[in-house]
Image: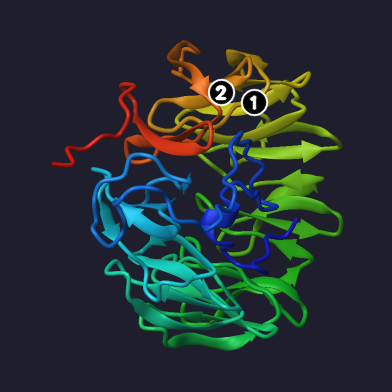
């Protein structure tokens, strides 16, 4: 269950819903790769005219969303206006912005663009991640290292596998096993584990033998290895698996309740998505059912709403389980920065929490 970064940060437009080994989040939507084709009409990225419907779309991040329109990938702002047109124009892939830079793929190499659309770090890496805490994990051939926003190596290529920095530490593999380094490249937790993952809320899951437990930032085991699967803490609780059943523990390793679930997601906005008998619902932080399992698909709460499938269409519910945006979408994404991407037929649009589609005056 060690989090790896091979094929790092697969570009969002191609793999928005791919779940890593550390994220069993259920999301009903997937973004297909749109074929490049010329749409009818005169609006194009060159004219920066507002577009309201897209061939594909991603969540908003840092005020921008990546969309496919008129056969091209561009970024729109929250008014729907095209704000950034990536250069070079012919890209194999492009991702959302993180820390002011976006990952791009040109041929078989990865690099970064800034918010003007220009190349900030030339494509040169075999794989790469989004920037996190000012650094990005990159791979050249079979070695991993870390660069800053100028593209300069801060930690040279040397690790067989590694993770992005999280809470000041990065999980890496050294000769003797898996451990952690700080930003000065100092080994702060000795490589003595068979597997490890990122720190979250001060703790990280590690594998000793065939069981998972949790360590603090001194490397001390604070929750003894006892789980077949363990995931990062979110809002004070972590989901763990014993056999094929899931439950939640606090940072002392204590179970929140006796309830067991067929599947579970991280807590978000006070609720966690769980599966019981093939139906999805939500529990609160005491482990009590907050919204009874009734949906064939559902997603985490964000901005107070969650996308769920009702019949053969997607809708949005509030934290009381009430449908607040009626079932009408073929696919639906999470709200991010006040907007959610939704698909009707073959076109994507953005909707607000008050049920208004993103529109702008084109005059």
Residue 336: image location, x then y, percent: 39, 40
Q: Quadrant of residue 196?
A: bottom right
Res. 285 in view? no
Nearest to the observer: residue 164 or residue 204: 164
Residue placed under numbered mark 2 in the picture: 308
Residue 169: image location, x then y, percent: 52, 68
Q: Residue at x 45, y 47 (%)?
A: 58
Q: Earlier in the sequence, mark 1 or mark 2?
A: 1
Residue placed under numbered mark 1 in the picture: 297
Is the C-beta separation of discs 1 and 2 under 8 Å?
Answer: yes
Q: Residue at x 25, y 46 (%)?
A: 50
Q: Is residue 193 above or below residue 204?
A: below
Q: Is residue 86 above or below residue 148?
A: above
Q: Residue at x 70, y 52 (%)?
A: 21
Q: Is residue 167 left or right of residue 214?
A: left
Nearest to the observer: residue 274 or residue 68: 68
Q: Is residue 22 above or below residue 194?
A: above
Task: Please identify the quadrant where the C terminus is shown.
Answer: top left
Q: Mark 1 Cα within 10 Å, few/some/many (few <14, many 20+)?
A: some
Q: Secondary structure at mark 2?
A: strand
Nearest to the observer: residue 38 or residue 353: 38
The colour scheme of the drawn protein is rainbow
Task: Please identify the quadrant where the N terminus is shown.
Answer: bottom right
Nearest to the observer: residue 24 or residue 296: 296
Residue 77: image location, x then y, percent: 27, 49
Residue 331: image location, x then y, percent: 55, 32
Cα separation, mark 1 vs mark 2, equals: 6 Å
Q: Is residue 202 above or below residue 346?
A: below
The image's mark for residue 21 is: none
Q: Mark 2 Cα within 10 Å, few/some/many (few <14, many 20+)?
A: many
């Amino acid at each position: 269950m060690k989090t790896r970064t091979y094929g790092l940060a697969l570009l969002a437009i191609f793999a928005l819903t791919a779940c890593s080994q550390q994220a069993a989040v259920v999301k009903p939507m997937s973004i297909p790769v749109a074929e490049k084709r010329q749409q009818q009409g005169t609006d194009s990225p060159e004219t920066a005219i507002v577009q309201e419907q897209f061939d594909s779309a991603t969540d908003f991040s840092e005020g921008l969303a990546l969309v496919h329109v008129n056969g091209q990938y561009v970024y729109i702002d929250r008014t729907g206006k095209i704000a950034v047109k990536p250069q070079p124009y012919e890209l194999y892939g492009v991702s959302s912005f993180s820390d002011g830079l976006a990952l791009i793929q040109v041929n078989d190499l990865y690099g970064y663009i800034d918010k003007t659309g220009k190349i900030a770090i030339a494509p040169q890496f075999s794989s790469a991640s989004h920037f996190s805490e000012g650094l990005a994990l990159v791979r050249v051939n079979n070695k991993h290292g870390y660069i800053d926003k100028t593209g300069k190596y801060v930690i040279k290529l040397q690790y067989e596998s590694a993770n992005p920095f999280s809470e000041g530490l990065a999980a890496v593999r050294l000769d003797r096993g898996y451990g952690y380094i700080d930003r000065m490249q100092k080994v702060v937790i000795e490589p003595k584990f068979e597997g490890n993952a990122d720190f979250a809320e001060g703790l990280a899951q590690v594998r000793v033998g065939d069981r998972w437990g949790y360590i603090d930032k001194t490397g001390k085991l604070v929750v003894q290895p006892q789980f077949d699967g363990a995931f990062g803490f979110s809002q004070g609780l972590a989901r763990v698996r014993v056999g094929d059943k899931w439950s939640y523990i606090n940072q002392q390793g204590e179970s929140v309740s006796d309830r067991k679930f067929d599947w579970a997601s991280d807590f978000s906005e006070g609720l966690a998505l769980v599966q019981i008998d093939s139906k999805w619902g939500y529990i609160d932080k005491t482990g009590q059912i907050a919204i009874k399992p009734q949906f064939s698909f559902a997603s985490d709460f964000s901005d107070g709403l969650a996308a769920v499938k009702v019949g053969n269409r997607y809708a949005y519910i509030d934290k009381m389980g009430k449908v607040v945006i009626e079932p009408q979408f073929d696919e639906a994404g999470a709200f991010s920065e006040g907007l959610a991407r939704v698909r009707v037929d073959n076109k994507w649009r953005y909707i607000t929490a008050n049920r208004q589609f993103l529109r702008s005056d084109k005059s």
